[in-house]
Image: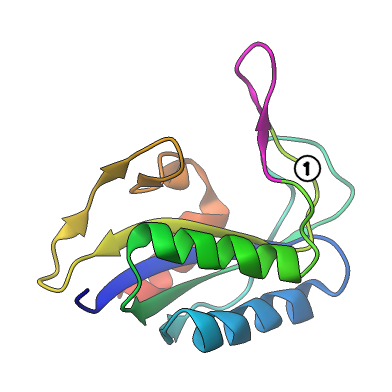
Amino acid sequence: MAVIKFYLSIGSNLGNREANVQRACEMLNQYCGTILRTSKPYYSASWGYDSDHEYVNICVAIQTALSPHELLKQTQDIERALGRTSKTSVSDNGQLLYTDRTIDIDLLQGLDARGGEIIISTPELTLPHPRMNERPFVTIPLAEIMQ
């Protein structure tokens, strides 16, 4: 597969949040590709649920030879390795249920080798991320690394 670029959001609100995010970046570089740009940390309250734990989030641009689904699998493996035990679930009425987490890595959008936007809609993965524009903790750091 050709080398492609992805934009990812990385967040943590449990434990040593900054260290969790830094370790996720190290593992992305080790297992997924090369991080090209990293935003400054963005601190915020939880989004979509109430928590006493503040989040730290960053966005990164990564260059990889992995397909979108391969990258998703690798990011989920990294989340598990860093102590994430559950993903967001859906309630009986279809509402998304969010919880505190040691690490969260979301694929936001991808660009193919020619710079065209990658569009995917499968049960496992939707690109671009359907809710990224609703979240300041994504839009602000993402704008920083896309300049």
Q: Quadrant of the N terminus?
A: bottom left
* Magenta-colored stretch includes residue 90: yes
Question: Circle 1 sits on which residue?
Answer: 99
Say which residue appears at 85% left-offset and 62% top-offset.
Answer: 14
Q: Check disc 1 and report its element: helix, strand or loop.
A: loop
Say which residue appears at 19% left-offset and 76% top-offset.
Answer: 2
Q: Which residues are magenta?
A: 87-96
Q: Is residue 75 placed above or below 128 in the rendered structure?
A: below
Residue 19, given in percent of the width and then of the height, sits at 77, 81
Residue 72, given in percent of the width and then of the height, sits at 48, 59
Q: Nearer the viewer, residue 135 or 125?
A: 125
Q: Is residue 36 placed above or below 75 in the rendered structure?
A: below
Kind of residue at badge 1: Thr
Quadrant of the rendered image containing residue 70: bottom left
Is the stretch drawn in magenta largely helix, strand or loop?
A: loop
* Magenta-colored stretch includes residue 25: no
Q: Residue furthest top?
A: 93
For the residue carrying disc 1, how many other residues have a C-alpha within 10 Å: few (<14), some (14-19), or many (20+)? Answer: some
